[in-house]
Amino acid sequence: MKRIFSGVQPTGNLHLGNYLGALRNWVRLQDDYDCLFCVVDLHAITTWQEPGELATNTREVTAGMLAAGLDPKSNIIFNQSQVSGHAELAWIFNCVARLGWLNRMTQFKEKAGKSRENASVGLFVYPDLMAADILLYKATHVPVGDDQKQHLELTRDIANKFNNDFKVDFFPTVEPLIFGAGTRIMSLRDGTKKMSKSDPSDNSRINMTDGTDAIARKIRRAKTDPHPLPASPAEFDDRPEAANLMGLFAALSETSIEEVCGRYGGGLFSTFKGDLADLAVARLGPIQDEMRRLKEAPDYVDQVLGDGARRARELAQPTLDEIQDIVGFLRP
Ligand code: TRP
């Protein structure tokens, strides 16, 4: 059986990059796979989170998942901290993974920056927890963006070492599912940087909670270059902003980048931006309406998460029992 696990951090406002890069792709997978979609609050606290905001963001991300079209009945949607098996297995993996492996993780280096000595220990072992998320359910496929590929490699290394150390054939090999165009949405202010909730400029991103006016304004003010629009993706070299905006159009209209280039190539950014703004408003509007509705129904959202967590625990328990036997832990 093919089983998917994927996670999203509740560390800030959900933005267009999260929607086009993750949520929208998950919606397409839900019919073909047995899926678990997790709001990874344990990962979130590897950097400081205000408790009240963490709770709000966990609900907002969940609302985004539901509004994007994920079915909470056919999928398991839950927040990570409600299933203690994630933390338990992560501890075992802390003892399987090697310091040298984690030292090579580029995301830790980026996030820790110059103040490595000041980073939380949790941030360093973040990838072990991610491996635990995936392997607790013996997931076979993980949809991720480019930036998570290295973590997925580490997951495979951990699974292999566990199998070798304990002389078992227990954990499966995990395959990444990488998506095509529109999975990597870049900042509206700098086409070489990923759209991110941590960018200090709010104009760099379109938040899923932005209103019609804000969406149109941010697109109108998005950085461009002085040339006419490229007539083919071959002309994207050194034009990251044009590539990003045209990629955004392709992703939102579910057409190919070639088609967008064919339609707008040689034209003016101003005309194109007007169309892009209309498209973004039309596509995001219904999702935003549903998110607003769910914001007023926190009890329903909590109930979805509680129900998902219960089903996730049931799925994880036999695996956890077996792992404890393999490791030599006594249990009732
Ligand atoms: N690290 C992922 C990110 O920041 C989130 C994540 C946590 C995840 N656990 C996961 C993704 C398991 C896929 C599978 O995007």
Image (tube, grey):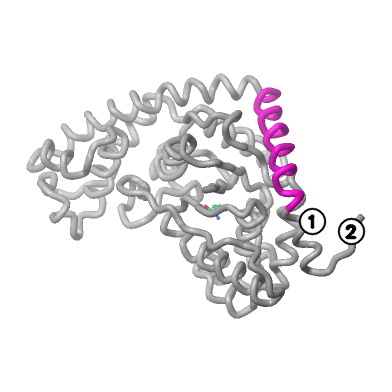
Tally the numbered discs.
2
Q: Position of residue 331 (x, y in %)?
A: 89, 58
Q: Name the residue: 41% across, 45% down.
A: 21
Residue nearest the viewer, comparing 196 with 80: 80
First in sequence, mark 2 or 1: give its number. Answer: 1
Q: Name the residue: 67% across, 54% down.
A: 136
Q: Label 2: how many residues lie within 10 Å, few (<14), some (14-19) or many (20+)? A: few
Residue nearest the viewer, comparing 158 with 263: 158
Image quarter (top left, top right, bottom left or bottom right) of the C terminus: bottom right
Amino acid on which the number 1 mark rests in the picture:
Asp
Considering the numbered disc 2 on the image, is that residue within a helix, a strand or a loop?
Answer: loop
For marks 2 and 1, give the CA distance.
8 Å
Residue under numbered circle 1: 321
Q: Position of residue 311 (x, y in %)?
A: 70, 38
Q: Is mark 1 within 8 Å of ligand 1?
A: no
* Residue 286 against residue 152 in the figure, above or below: above
> Circles 2 and 1: CB distance less than 8 Å?
yes
Left or right of 84: which side holds 34?
left
Q: Name the residue: 40% across, 53% down.
A: 178
Left or right of 50: which side holds 283?
left
Amino acid on which the number 2 mark rests in the picture:
Arg
Q: Is residue 128 magenta?
A: no
Q: Point out which mark residue 49 bears.
A: none
Considering the numbered disc 1 on the image, is that residue within a helix, a strand or a loop?
Answer: helix
Task: Give, as a single range, the part of the protein colored magenta.
Answer: 298-318
Q: Is mark 2 within 8 Å of ligand 1?
A: no
Picture quadrant of residue 114 = bottom right
Residue under numbered circle 2: 331
Q: Name the residue: 74% across, 37% down.
A: 310
